[in-house]
Amino acid sequence: MENKKTTEIVEVSENTQLDAFGNFENMKEAWKMAEALAKSTIVPEEYRGNPANCLIAIDMASRLNMSPMMVMQGLYVVKGKPSWSGQMAIALINGSRRYEAPIKFVFEGKGPTLSCYAVATDLEGNIVKGTTITMDMVMGEGWDSDKGSSKSKWKTMPEQMMQYRAASFFARANCPDVLYGIYTADETIEMESPKKTKSEAVNPFAPKEEAEAVETITVVETEEDLPDFMKGGK
C-alpha cells in the first residue's frame, strides 16, 4: 500500500504543470497567476505590470518544467517577440542532458582574427561541433552595428558575445528543439534591424568613440481584443 501511495503522489506531482493555452479554463487560471506575478516588485522589469508577458513566461515554464521565475530571468520580450538570453540558451543546452558534459567554447586568434566555436561530446561518444563565429562574420552580418546595447558589448566583451552566439548556432544545428524555436534576444534584434552594407562594416577593435548603450527590450502591448477576463486586471 505504501508503494502504491508513493507512486500516486509522484504521478500527481509530475502532472501539476499548468498548460496555459491548453483550454479556456486553464488560460483563466494562468491569467490569475500572471496577474499576481505582474504585481511583484522582484520580477524583471519587462513583466512588472504586464500580465500578458507573465502569461507567456508561465506557458514556457510549463513546457520546460521550470519555475516561472527562472524562465522570467532568461526570457525577454524583444520587439513583441519572446527571446532567450544568451545565458539561458547555454543553460537549456546543458540542461538537456544530451551531452556527457557542458558544452565547451574554443577560442582561436585575437583581436580582428578572434574566432570561437562550441563543442561537446554526445552520449555515444561523438564529438559535436557548432559553427565557428569569426570577427569577419560579426562585421559582415552587422552584429556590431548600432543596435542598442549590443554595440558596446561587442566592442568591450567580444569573447562573451561570441560564446553566446556560438551557443545559439550550436543549438540550431544540433539540438534546435531545446530552444523551442525561440531565438536569442540579440538574434531577434538583428532580424528586426537593417543590416549594414559591406562598406559600412567596421572592425569593433578599431579605436573610435563609443556610443552610449541604450536599452533594446520592448514590452509587448496588450491586444485590444483580449477576452473580458483578461481586461481590467480583476
Image (cartoon, helix red, strand yellow):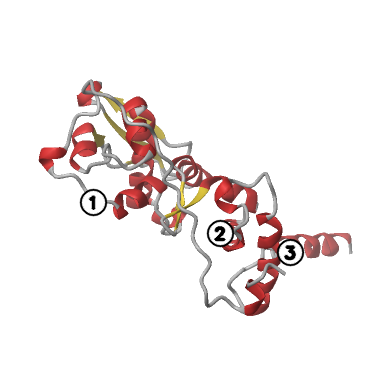
| Amino acid on which disc 2 is placed | Asn
Q: Amino acid at mark 1?
A: Pro
- What residue did someone put label 2 on? 53
- Whether residue 14 sits left or right of residue 162 in the image: it is right
| Label disc, if present, on residue 41 of the rendered structure | none
Q: Which residue carries the number 3 mark?
A: 11
Q: Residue at coordinates 42% horizontally, 56% vertically from top-left?
A: 182
Q: Is residue 53 above or below residue 196?
A: below
Depicted 154 relative to depicted 23: above or below: above
Q: Which residue is label 1 attached to?
A: 194
Secondary structure beneath dot 3 equals: helix
- Mark nearer the N terminus (3 vs 1): 3
Q: Looking at the image, which is closer to me, 213 or 135?
A: 213
Report crowding for label 3: few under 14, some 14 to 19, many 20 or more residues within 10 A (C-alpha).
few
Horizontal relation, residue 195 to residue 19: left or right: left
Q: Relative to 28, is 213 above or below? A: above
Image coordinates of residue 40 in percent, x first then y, are 70, 50
Secondary structure of residue under mark 2: helix
